[in-house]
């Protein structure tokens, strides 16, 4: 087991990463009161709930099992968590434990942020995406019919358990979706890690425990470094959104849950790389590397053919990254170095949005 | 105009108190972006919205008018604020302005805390209760069918305008409800202020502007002092809940909105004083002063006759002040000095809960 400390002053917390963590007594030291509410979903609970429960004896443990999927990440389902907490009379010393992927984690974290104006929570992410993304940063929240993640709070967990064993049951598409974020960390911040990923992509896809641990550790480390510099996302942290503004537009257009978040980020990353190249920052060889590693990870490298340039612009206009009317995008100055900018000619963006089959070809 | 600075480090903000503040250009310096969403209700908007709008020229001003009353302080109505923000494409630099009483303030503040994980908000409280209570402390939130204020966040405003002129249209009952909180500040923290209130109660009830300003200023000052010591309510701030655990039980039993919050706090304060006397901390003369000033303010000094001791215990058990099963109450060690304690014989509490007509008589 490796442990990474996320350094946020009095809100610091550890991430434990490794094999067979679920049944080890790692959580009890972080549970302050006597009450625990486990939040999971219909897919994950049958697989891993019993194992988790084995380390929670001695507490009042209640649970709520939500339906599985991004389509249920909304205020109504957070309200069901509140219902359960109040029916079981959980007080402000309770601890919420999220056992599941990003959707469960985001909703549980948001419920914890708001229940009695803030209670403790613990993350046990069961997808690669949530292990490398929601483990760090404290972002919680839900979707609104008019925009993704529009309602939420910053709320840090007490501890995170990233158990690589649970990835054994993860569907192929979801593993790929997680790899989209892993690749992102290399692209925005660490060319050496990007090269390591190019070499180890097949080991990662066959779920080699050692390779997974290493990829998770370095991904969380990069994110933690950026979050520590910028907990409330006013500066450097925005770089973590590479591919996300395009990706959110794809998810919204297609309806939440049709494209996985990581798949949309994969295509969005290719779009960001394409625009970066049109601005003269990336070479054709760079673009080819980006396409190749996304494809090796099993990710789409183009947006849906049905999405027009106008549709993208319309949807990106409500993205949180719009400040006073100008669209800010994360682009690549080189492989391993990203920048946030609104200083690009609108025609270059239009070229990227209309490139279709030619996306990634200068 | 007097200005009180609430000292919370980088979250510090001013409260302006006085006559005719609504139409003065006091808000613009605190609006960072170009977008403003005014949230008000059907009672207050026709009276004061135009006046407020006169100081917002030059901004994109949108508004949402909610139904009036505690019964609407729930997630559904907060969601209507989110709908309006997203329909009008407000970004994360937007500022929400709450024009109304505590319900509007609590919902608007909570919406601001959660919209895009936190945007700015401004309070323009239009009831005495909200001027002396929600102006300070950053508590925001909504009710749940199983408990009052169970869902919320701590979120500080940029500035508060407490205009005494708007109290001219406040119904008599609501003025009294606000005075319950004013009296509370004297009881828990300042015997001299309590004596001042005894002398000035008739001036306050005939809405003398000078007396009101002074009462609001000193109330906010006492609350600000306590909140500055304890922003997240782990210690001294709990003293502000004098009468509230009993009061919340009354409100829940009667259905939100039947008893005004301040009326329930009035009866709850009498119950807390009664229990304090049974513990030997207050004299019969003290109890008589408490009853007399509550009555002079036009407040009830007994709970509803229909509420049994068992019903109180049941409802108080879900109150946020319960920690690990033991009920903690704010009681009076003497007039002007309060304490939080769970160290009292259950029989004394039962005596208070069953006192009926004899409440406040040793």
Image: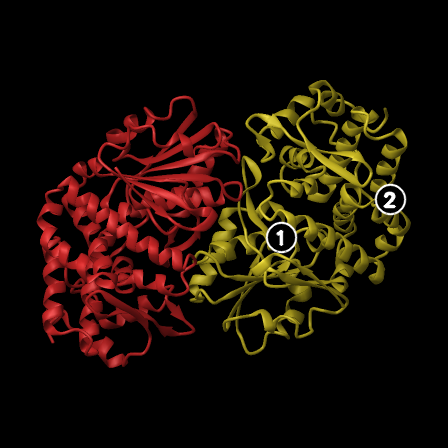
Chain colours: A red, B yellow
> From this viewpoint, is residue B25 visible?
yes
Q: In the picture, residue A188 is in which quadrant?
A: bottom left
Closer to us: A84 or A141: A141
Q: Are marks 2 and 1 in contact (CB under 8 Å)?
A: no
Residue A340 is left or right of residue A184, and the answer is right
Same chain? Circles 2 and 1: yes
Q: Dot 1: within a 10 Å radius of its alpha carbon, few (fewer than 14), some, or many (20 or more) residues?
A: some
Q: In the picture, residue B39 is in which quadrant?
A: bottom right
Tag 1, which chain?
A: B
Mark 1, residue position: B68
Give the image location of residue B255, x and y in percent. Answer: 63, 37
Q: Which mark is residue B240?
A: none
Q: In the picture, residue A238 is in which quadrant?
A: bottom left
Compared to residue A112, the image places residue A296 above or below, namely below
Residue at left 71%, top 20%? Answer: B345
Compared to residue B238, the image places residue B96 above or below, namely below
Tag 2, which chain?
A: B
Residue B77 is left or right of residue A309, and the answer is right
Mark 2, residue position: B296
**C-alpha span from label 2 to label 1:** 27 Å
Badge nearest the viewer, 2 or 1: 2
- Under tag 2, what secondary structure? helix
Q: Upstream in the sequence, badge 2 or badge 1?
A: 1
- Under tag 1, what secondary structure? loop
């Amino acid at each position: 087991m490796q442990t990474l400390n996320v350094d946020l002053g009095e809100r610091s917390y550890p991430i434990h990463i490794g094999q067979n963590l679920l049944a080890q007594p790692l959580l009890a030291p972080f549970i302050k009161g006597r009450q625990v509410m486990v939040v999971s979903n219909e897919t994950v609970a049958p697989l891993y709930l019993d194992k988790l429960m084995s380390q929670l004896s001695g507490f009042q443990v209640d649970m709520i099992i939500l339906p599985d999927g991004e389509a249920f990440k909304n205020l109504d389902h957070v309200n069901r968590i509140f219902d359960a907490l109040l029916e079981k009379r959980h007080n402000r010393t309770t601890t919420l434990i999220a056992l599941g992927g990003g959707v469960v984690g985001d909703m549980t974290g948001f419920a914890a942020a708001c229940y009695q104006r803030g209670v403790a929570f613990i993350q046990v992410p069961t997808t690669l995406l949530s292990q490398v993304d929601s483990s760090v940063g404290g972002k919680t929240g839900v979707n609104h019919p008019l925009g993704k993640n529009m309602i939420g709070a910053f709320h840090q967990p007490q501890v995170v358990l990233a158990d690589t064993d649970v990835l054994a049951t993860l569907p192929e598409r979801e593993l790929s979706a997680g790899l989209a974020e892993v690749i992102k960390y290399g692209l925005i911040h660490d060319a050496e890690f990007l090269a390591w990923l190019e070499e180890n992509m097949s080991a990662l896809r066959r779920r080699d425990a050692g390779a997974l641990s290493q990829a998770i550790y370095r991904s969380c480390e990069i994110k933690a470094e950026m979050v520590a510099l910028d907990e409330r996302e006013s500066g450097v942290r925005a770089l973590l959104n590479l591919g996300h503004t395009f990706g959110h537009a794809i998810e919204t257009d297609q309806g939440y849950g049709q494209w996985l978040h990581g798949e949309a980020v994969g295509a969005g990353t290719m779009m960001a790389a394409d625009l970066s190249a049109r601005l003269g920052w990336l070479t054709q060889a760079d673009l080819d590397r980006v396409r190749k590693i996304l494809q090796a990870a099993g990710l789409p490298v183009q947006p849906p053919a049905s999405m027009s340039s106008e549709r993208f612009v319309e949807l990106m206009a409500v993205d949180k990254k719009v400040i006073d009317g100008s669209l800010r995008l994360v682009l690549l100055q080189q492989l391993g170095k990203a920048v946030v900018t609104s200083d690009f000619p609108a025609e270059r963006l239009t070229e990227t949005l209309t490139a279709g089959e030619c996306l990634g070809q200068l």
